Amino acid sequence: MILTTLAESGAYEGLGERVAAGLRWLRTFDPAIPDGRHAIDGDDVFALVSTYDTGPSTEKRFETHVRHVDLQYVASGHERILHAPAAALTVETPYDEATDVAFYAEPPFASSLLMRPGDLAVFHPDDAHKPGCMAGGRHTVRKVVVKVRV
């Protein structure tokens, strides 16, 4: 897991050309772009743009992905993302290849990332994460998740 800002993300372009393509796309992100899926490099790199309200962490679930690295960028609003190593968690819903997601039971401990406008978190396949959690109250969040095929 990596926590940085989009402005300071240049060093992470070394993680590979697909990650670099996703970061370049994020740097040109137009906040007026509609919610939905946006192609960057076919199915290898694409962006999921969404607007939503955060909620209590008890209403969210830890997840992982096998085929993708997540570049999670907050364009506006605030949220908490909880994080824990997947190897330490108990699978609650087994991996579904069609949706590239597995869900996990709540662990006794997790790290908490405060995501503010301009923040960027990178989650690798072994990084369980629980996005969309309230940070001091409910907030409307405008977020981009760039999915990078590993």
Image (cartoon, helix red, strand yellow):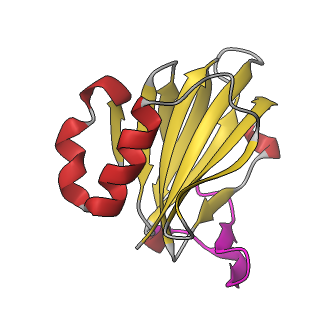
Residue 109 on the magenta span: yes
Residue 97, located in which quarter of the rendered image?
bottom right
Residue 110 seen in the figure: no
Q: Which is nearer the eye, 16 or 64?
A: 16
Residue drawn at the location 34% of the way across and 55% of the way down: 19
Residue 31 location, quadrant: top right
- 121 shown above or below 29: below
- Rendered location of residue 24, percent (x, y): 36, 41
How many dots with numbers?
A: 0
Q: Quadrant of the C terminus?
A: bottom left
x and y percent of residue 56 in the render?
A: 78, 33
Q: Which residues are magenta?
A: 88-110
The residue lying at 57 percent from left, 24 percent from top is: 75
> Is the residue 140 above or below the residue 144 in the image?
above
Give the percent coordinates (x, y) of residue 10.
22, 37
- The residue located at (59%, 39%) in the rendering is 144
Could you tell me if residue 149 is visible in this image? yes
- Image coordinates of residue 90 in percent, x first then y, are 61, 74
Q: Is residue 113 magenta?
A: no
Is 36 placed left or right of 26 in the picture? Answer: right
Query: Which image quarter: residue 6?
Result: top left
Q: Is residue 113 above or below residue 86?
A: above
At x 78%, y 18%, the residue is 138
Side of 10 where 134 appears, left or right: right
